[in-house]
Amino acid sequence: MWLWLLWWSSLLSCHEDERSALLQFKRSFVVDKSTCRYEGDYPKTSYWDSKEGSSNCCSWDGVECDLEIGHVIGLDLSGGCIYGSIHSSSTLFHLIHLRKLNLAFNHFNRSSIPTSIGQLSEMVYLNLSSSFFFGQVPSEIFRLSKLSSLDLSLNYDNFTRERFLKLKSPNLRGLVRNFSCLEILRISYVDVPSEMPDLLANFSSLTDLRLGYTGLYGSIPSSLSKLSQLTRLDLYYNHLSGHIPSSLQNLTQLIGLRIYGNQISGPIPSWCGNLTKLNVLAFADNIFYGPISQSLFKLNNLEKLYLNRNHLDGTVEFNMFLNMTRLAQLSLSFNKLSIFFGARNMNTTTLPKFKILGLSSCNIWKLPRSLATCMMLEFIDFSNNKLADVFPTWLGTLPGLKVLFLQKNGFHGSIRRTKNTLEFPYLHIIDISYNSFTGALPSEYLFIWNGVKASEMSNSTYMHAREPFTGSHHDVFLYHYNYTANLIIKSVRTYYEKIRDELAVIDLSCNRFSGMIPEFNGNLVALRSLNLSNNMLTGRIPLSVGNLSQLESLDLSQNMLSGEIPQQLRQLNFLQSFNVSHNNLTGPIPQGNQLHTFDPTSFEGNPGLCGDPLPKKCGDSESFLPPTSADEEDDDSGSLIKLDWKFVLAGAISGFVVGVALGDMVIYQRHV
């Protein structure tokens, strides 16, 4: 059948006026690979009307025509590398027969949704998500009474969390009143400051309702139980309070239930065990209390369970989760729970399924060696527990481990490579701060990983815009694992939408490491944050720190470092946070670029330092000049620091960061 459709569509000839409208629409934007935002994006309109392409617009990429009359009825330019503004005069709105329009994952430069969209009265599918549209959603959109799918979600600023789109006048109630045929409504990250309207119950055919981070307040209406076809309900990061109404137990078709980040209270309802089709249950960041309901262990289809950051208490046997045969992501961090890993009857046959284990602050004493069988593990968080052990070198056998958090425990001793131990081949992020590790920095083992080459960086399209990684790396606290990252560093939050080789973080602070800082491998371009503060390190700051070209945060404070601050650090063009305070450093602070712009507290506690931004000025003006190439060669040849510390991090990370509200909780992933 599909071969016949393909053959027939190749014979169709589109209408000339529609062909012209499409070409004029294309020419109103910048469209090329440089504007792509995600891996897999490509400029779909590149071959429209080109020498290699066809003159028949019905065969163009992203264009769908009616098989009988040849009118353009569908336009899918999602991820099409489009950049520019869109206006009501756009020829796009000449395509009055359009039934489907998808402009998601482009960049429309904060332009308004054009009022002319109301002219497309035949529209049944409209997707404008994650495309940088701005302002009030126009009332004209409510003229599209035939819509069955509307997606305006994820138009927001990654850094400030500013929501670009507003639904105030008309409001959510007006939207609900006008679209009686809706099956899919996705308006997450649209500013909708209102209570949840009871009118939502009238959408008897609704299957997908996403209202995350919209500003909703009040209680969850019990009338939602009338949505008997609902498979996904997102209410995360709002201001909802009260209990979960028991009537929601009637939503037996639910596959995903995400209510994290509210002020929902009460015990976890026992009726949750009746929602047997659930594969995602996210109740994190609320005020749930009491023990974990035993009914949850009946959810055999559950793949992701996020209960972190509540007030749950009691003792839980980890074995209970092992009986949930599909569970791969589990977060119980930051409750009042005690997790018991019983050595007896441990069901190790089901352990390998786990990818994410967030068990921070769970009163764990035994690091369970059975984790070595979890070959799928990508994320481990055992921070803030009572673990007293040497460094778990056996975790190096996990081939896909990308994130490791062991901070704030009682780990001790030196970190040395053991015979026949693997080397954490894909580890990107490690935080072992606030322990009692001693000896030299683990240069011969922990950081001998495959380097990320500059050529690989230049080919990446995951992060089109640079996100600053600011703040010193204390109490790094990851709480959106799996495909997202949200680092909180001294109250400064940085969001990473999709983590790949471009982000590597090392925090060895607040231990008792001693000796010199070895030289850094020049191929390390992934490292964004390095924290070696509050140790007993001596010697000079290596000149090779200047080779860490992507470094955004560097903290070497509270050590016993001596000598001058290398002029090579002026090469760190992306440095946003820098701290060398309370050492024995001497000489002038290098001038130019960012170094002299940091607060004086970044340099205090070094009586021998002089120059801006310190009040103590250097007597010799020539000391402000960078060394000549000959001077640099002399410094290199005379350096006593010749160790090969290969801080090289890698891995095609497809998942993630720090604390535990996990997974697709902040933002549903593209192509979900």
Image (spheres, rainbow, N blue to C red):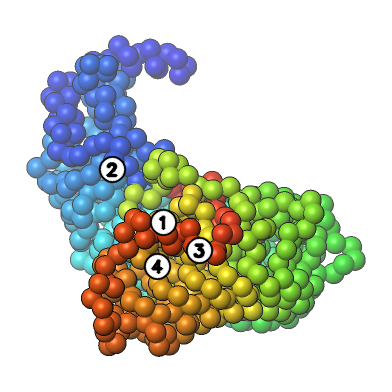
What's under tag 2, amino acid-wise? Thr
Residue type at the position of mark 1:
Glu
Which circle, 2 or 1, is nearer the viewer? 1
Is residue 221 visible to us here?
no
Q: In the drawing, does residue 667 fall left or right of residue 570?
A: right
State the separation of the CA atoms marked 2 and 1: 41 Å
Which one is closest to the eye, mark 2 or mark 4? Answer: 4
**Which amino acid, mark 4?**
Pro
Q: Is residue 97 above or below residue 496?
A: above
Mark toward the start of the polypeptide (3 vs 2): 2
Q: CA distance from mark 3 to mark 1?
A: 10 Å
From the image, state whether disc 1 or disc 4 is nearer to you: 1
Q: Residue 566: which disc?
A: 4
Give the crowd class for mark 2: few <14, some 14-19, many >=20 residues within 10 Å.
many
Tag 3: amino acid: Ser
Residue 506, compared with residue 428, is above or below; it is below
